[in-house]
């Protein structure tokens, strides 16, 4: 009888970048569990949360234990990690939730392992970014590409500049926000993006009190105000905002084209004829075009 070979019996040495659940622990992949069972030591953004995950999964702790690796200690702990690692080491790295290195620490770790010619192996899984994008209902393509911007800055002046940059460069933008800055960020978004900006909100994605919301910015702010008056705790949690500027930008582009035609042809075509021509060509109200002709 032919022996069945288990691919996880012999895992090659290297650094494994392992995605973990963003809320619902049942979302962890089978492969992630099998790799976690095999690592010699595990680097974790928070070792306490890592141990809780191992306990939930019912798997033994790594033989060489856990080592903290986050934004506060990554430069200090990196030499320790490299000294601890040899050509036979199976090293795992997880962040608190989701996929490492996406608005989370880990970049310098990967680059250091690359310098030492160690294998780097992705173990993909859940990400708040892809989770939100999969259900926001906005179309992503070459005409309307999406850009991920990470977390908004904490200081207001930098945040305003951040949002101005977003609307200038994005058709669709994905932004993470923490529970305590959500209101301040949304107020700045209203000033920069306008009340009619289309918006998807994912709060506490995949968790027990997950909230999903679709609509425009002004309606969402009203919704938040109503919910806050009912139960302030109902708005706590981690947020993913997906903004869609595509329709606004199409409208702005159409208005610019109309003005260009008016300014170019107003000297050569009768106002009534020009208004009819442009109205049909750009599918805009004739009265609006005629007003622009009179202003030209």
Image (cartoon, rainbow, N blue to C red):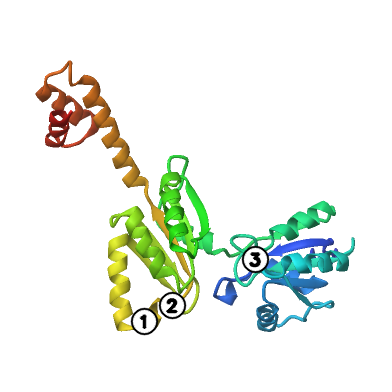
N-term-proximal mark, 2 vs 3: 3
Q: Are marks 3 and 1 in contact (CB under 8 Å)?
A: no
Closest to the observer, 125 or 143: 143
Residue that mark 3 sits on: 19
Q: CA distance from mark 2 to mark 1?
A: 8 Å
Q: For the point 83% across and 56% down, which residue is it?
A: 118
Please identify the quadrant where the N terminus is shown: bottom right
Residue that mark 1 sits on: 232
Judge from the rendering whether residue 273 lies leftward or rightward of residue 217; answer left or right.
left
Q: CA distance from mark 3 to mark 1?
A: 32 Å
Mark 1, secondary structure of its residue: helix
Residue 195 spot, x, y in % from top left: 28, 57
Residue 120 spot, x, y in % from top left: 77, 56
Residue 56 spot, x, y in % from top left: 65, 82
Q: Are marks 2 and 1 in contact (CB under 8 Å)?
A: yes
N-term-proximal mark, 3 vs 1: 3
Mark 3, secondary structure of its residue: loop
Q: For the point 43% across and 77% down, which residue is it?
A: 236
Residue that mark 2 sits on: 236
Closest to the observer, 188 or 92: 188
Label 3: how many residues lie within 10 Å, few (<14), some (14-19) or many (20+)? Answer: many
Closest to the observer, 143 or 164: 164
Question: With respect to residue 115, does 64 lie above or below?
Answer: below
Please identify the quadrant where the C terminus is shown: top left
């Amino acid at each position: 009888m032919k022996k069945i070979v288990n691919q996880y019996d012999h895992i090659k040495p290297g650094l494994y970048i392992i995605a973990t659940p963003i809320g619902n622990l049942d979302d962890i992949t089978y492969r992630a569990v099998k790799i976690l069972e095999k690592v010699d030591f595990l680097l974790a953004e928070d070792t306490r949360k890592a141990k809780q995950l191992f306990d939930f999964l019912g798997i033994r702790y790594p033989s060489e234990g856990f080592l903290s690796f986050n934004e506060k200690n990554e430069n200090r702990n990196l030499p320790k990690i490299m000294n601890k690692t040899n050509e036979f080491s199976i090293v795992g790295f997880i962040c608190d939730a989701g996929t490492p290195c996406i608005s989370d620490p880990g970049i310098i770790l990967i680059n250091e392992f690359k310098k030492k010619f160690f294998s780097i192996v992705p173990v993909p899984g859940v990400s708040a970014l892809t989770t939100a994008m999969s259900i926001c209902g906005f179309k992503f393509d070459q005409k309307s590409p999406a850009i991920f911007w990470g977390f908004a800055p904490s200081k207001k002046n930098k945040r305003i500049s951040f949002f101005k940059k977003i609307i200038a460069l994005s058709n669709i933008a994905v932004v993470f926000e923490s529970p305590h800055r959500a209101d301040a960020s949304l107020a700045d978004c209203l000033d920069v993006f306008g009340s009619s900006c289309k918006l998807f909100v994912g709060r506490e994605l995949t968790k027990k009190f997950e909230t999903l919301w679709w609509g425009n910015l002004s309606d969402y702010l009203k919704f938040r105000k109503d919910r806050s008056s009912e139960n302030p705790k109902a708005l706590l949690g981690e947020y993913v905002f997906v903004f869609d500027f595509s329709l606004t930008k199409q409208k702005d582009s159409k208005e610019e084209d109309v003005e260009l035609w008016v300014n170019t042809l107003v000297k050569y075509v009768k106002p009534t004829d020009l208004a009819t021509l442009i109205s049909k060509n750009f599918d805009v109200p004739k009265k609006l075009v005629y007003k622009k002709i009179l202003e030209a």
